[in-house]
Image (tube, rainbow, N blue to C red):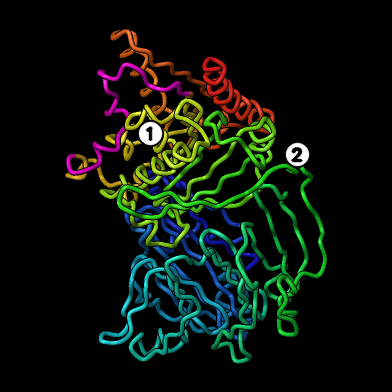
């Protein structure tokens, strides 16, 4: 309510997890000291974090839910739920609470630990990250599916008494990306081969079913999204689009219009705003291609270039990747790439490697822990495909990535120095022996593994660039490493140690290992504190890569 808040914070010794996130939730009433607020929920120190929130579905004829959760790992969560009356949201001394019975007891949500949940109307929505057979002997729902079930039946009679219904089931090329609600509609964003489209469902009048009413006819090389203007009172939506050469735009729409029209984007009422064109894209083409990884997997990538470029290997080409934490790369407008690279005549490429979320949880899980090499192999396959198709040569191919993508860059530097002419490694993880002891690193062990266990000897040592520098390599590609003194997620020590070790080893062995380092003293994990710093860091990186690649071209004229 307006007078009561759930608060998770650093309340002193023992109130944060090993990952540095809240371990304790307090209920804070307006006009009182937060230090005196009672603790209502707490997790274990080994948890990633804990949380508590209210989900009010009265506007859709549903109840009010209170949810408490413990994130055991980055991908697994335990949750407890109970239903409330409005009066339970008020301060304890509010007159309206007088005579009101205490809330129900919490019930543990009986779903898989890696599943996600939310409530809409009288339904419980369940998103799966692994296959699930909710009723023994019945249907198994595949990883990446989105289901709904009657919430009251689920919590009072158990999942065995429920009828589960599918909203979305993935195929080999599709995954759901996101969803949102208006008052009466459910809007699902679906990726099909990393191209996006929207599907819209209506919440039926009794709040127990979702019925498909329409959506986009086909997926496009475009980022498409929707958000409710006011999910409590209307079906109006903010409609967003963005593309590699199309500036981000905002329109006003009405989800209910799909019931009277089946045309693509028929729910759009009015175009409101658009970013200006930050660079000249009139002569650019956007294409999607596929490379074949070492194990035969087809890896998609997007390539943006001048129309009709010469296939002579002389095109300065920038390959960007991430490949972790189920984060997808895809079409979006990046003015800096256009201005600093494409307008100069360069080729820009984004690789949709495993570890990301482009094809749902299975694409991510294919590169977890001991399978991490598949993400790195995918990135190498895309680079080799660009060379094989004469877009570039290794001398005219640069690679760039940050954070987990910085680890990717470290691995490219150590494992395939022959494939790249320049590398920009930003805010990187590089020392995988100690990453879990630094800042938020403990929360990522579900992604990489736990180096304090047999994971280090079994596989993690293979993916720790700091430990993979080879003194027998005569020539590594030029690399720029950037970080921030105040990065609160990936400790700048990763970058500092790597660069110092490279400098020392190169000097001792008389090696040709050009390594450049810049540490911004502000800015957090983003590496810059304001637009001016961001512009400087961006120009620094792109100029380094461009000058390095073009100097190679000029030398070979």
SS for callout 1: helix
Q: CA distance from mark 1 to mark 2?
A: 32 Å
The tag earlier along the polypeptide, 1 or 2, is 2
The residue carrying pointer 1 sits among few (fewer than 14), some (14 to 19) or many (20 or more) residues within 10 Å by Cα, namely: many
Q: Which residue is the site of mark 2?
A: 280
- Location of residue 530 by image quarter: top right
Q: Is residue 134 left or right of residue 193?
A: left
The residue carrying pointer 2 sits among few (fewer than 14), some (14 to 19) or many (20 or more) residues within 10 Å by Cα, namely: few
Quick check: is 272 in the magenta stretch? no
Q: Nearer the viewer, residue 215 or 317?
A: 317
Q: Nearer the viewer, residue 515 or 283?
A: 283
Q: Which residues are magenta?
A: 457-479
Quick check: is 465 in the magenta stretch? yes
Q: Which residue is the site of mark 1?
A: 412
SS for callout 2: loop
- Location of residue 206 by image quarter: bottom right
Residues tagged 1 and 2 counted as in contact (Cβ below 8 A): no
Q: Which residue is painted at 28% across and 47% down in the image?
A: 449
Q: Which mark is residue 69?
A: none
Residue 403 at what x, y percent from top left?
46, 38
Residue 113 at what x, y percent from top left?
34, 67
Residue 87 at what x, y percent from top left?
59, 78
| Residue 108 appearing in the image | no
């Amino acid at each position: 309510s307006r007078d009561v808040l759930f608060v998770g914070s650093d309340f002193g010794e023992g109130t944060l997890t090993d990952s540095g996130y809240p371990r304790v939730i307090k209920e804070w009433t307006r006009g009182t000291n937060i230090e005196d607020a009672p603790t209502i929920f707490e997790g274990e120190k080994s948890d990633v974090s804990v949380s508590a929130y209210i989900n009010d579905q009265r506007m859709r004829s549903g109840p009010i839910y209170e949810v408490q959760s413990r994130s055991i790992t980055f991908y697994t969560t335990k949750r407890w739920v109970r239903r409330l009356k409005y009066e339970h949201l008020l301060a304890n001394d509010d007159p309206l609470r007088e005579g009101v019975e205490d809330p129900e007891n919490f019930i543990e949500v009986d779903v898989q630990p890696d599943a996600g949940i939310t409530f809409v109307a009288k339904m419980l929505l369940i998103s799966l990250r692994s296959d699930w057979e909710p009723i023994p002997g019945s249907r198994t729902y595949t990883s990446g599916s989105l289901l709904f079930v009657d919430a009251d039946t689920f919590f009072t009679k158990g999942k065995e008494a429920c009828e589960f219904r599918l909203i979305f089931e993935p195929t080999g090329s599709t995954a759901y990306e996101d969803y949102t609600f208006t008052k009466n509609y459910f809007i699902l964003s679906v990726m099909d081969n990393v191209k996006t489209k929207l599907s819209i469902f209506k919440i039926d009048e009794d709040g127990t079913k979702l019925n498909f009413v329409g959506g986009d006819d086909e997926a496009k090389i475009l980022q498409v999204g929707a958000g409710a203007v006011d999910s409590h009172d209307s079906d109006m939506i903010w409609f967003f689009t963005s593309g590699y050469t199309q500036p981000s735009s905002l329109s006003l729409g009405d989800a209910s219009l799909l019931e009277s029209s089946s045309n693509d984007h028929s729910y759009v009422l009015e175009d409101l705003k658009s970013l200006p064109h930050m660079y000249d894209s009139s002569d650019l083409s956007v294409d999607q291609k596929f490379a074949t990884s070492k194990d035969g997997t087809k890896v998609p990538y997007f390539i943006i270039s001048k129309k009709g470029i010469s296939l002579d290997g002389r095109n300065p080409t920038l390959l960007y990747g991430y490949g972790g934490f189920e984060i997808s790369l895809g079409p979006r407008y990046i003015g800096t790439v256009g201005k600093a690279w494409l307008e100069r005549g360069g080729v820009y490429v984004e690789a949709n490697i495993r570890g990301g979320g482009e094809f749902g949880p299975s694409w991510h899980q294919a590169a977890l822990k001991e399978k991490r090499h598949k993400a790195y192999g995918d990135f190498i396959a895309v680079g080799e495909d660009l060379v094989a198709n004469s877009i570039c040569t290794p001398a005219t191919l640069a690679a760039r990535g940050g954070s987990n993508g910085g680890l990717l860059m470290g691995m490219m530097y150590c494992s395939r120095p022959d494939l790249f002419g320049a590398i920009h490694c930003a805010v990187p993880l590089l020392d995988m022996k100690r990453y879990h002891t630094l800042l938020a690193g403990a929360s990522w062990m579900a992604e990489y593994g736990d180096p304090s266990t047999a994971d280090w000897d079994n596989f993690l040592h293979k993916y720790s660039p700091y430990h993979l520098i080879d003194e027998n390599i005569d020539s590594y590609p030029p690399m720029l490493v950037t970080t921030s003194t105040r990065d609160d997620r990936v400790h700048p020590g990763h970058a500092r140690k790597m660069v110092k070790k490279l400098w020392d080893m190169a000097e001792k062995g008389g090696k040709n290992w050009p390594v450049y380092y810049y540490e911004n003293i502000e800015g957090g994990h983003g590496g810059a504190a304001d637009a001016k710093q961001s512009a400087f860091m961006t120009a620094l990186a792109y100029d380094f890569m461009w000058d390095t690649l073009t100097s190679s071209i000029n030398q070979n004229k």
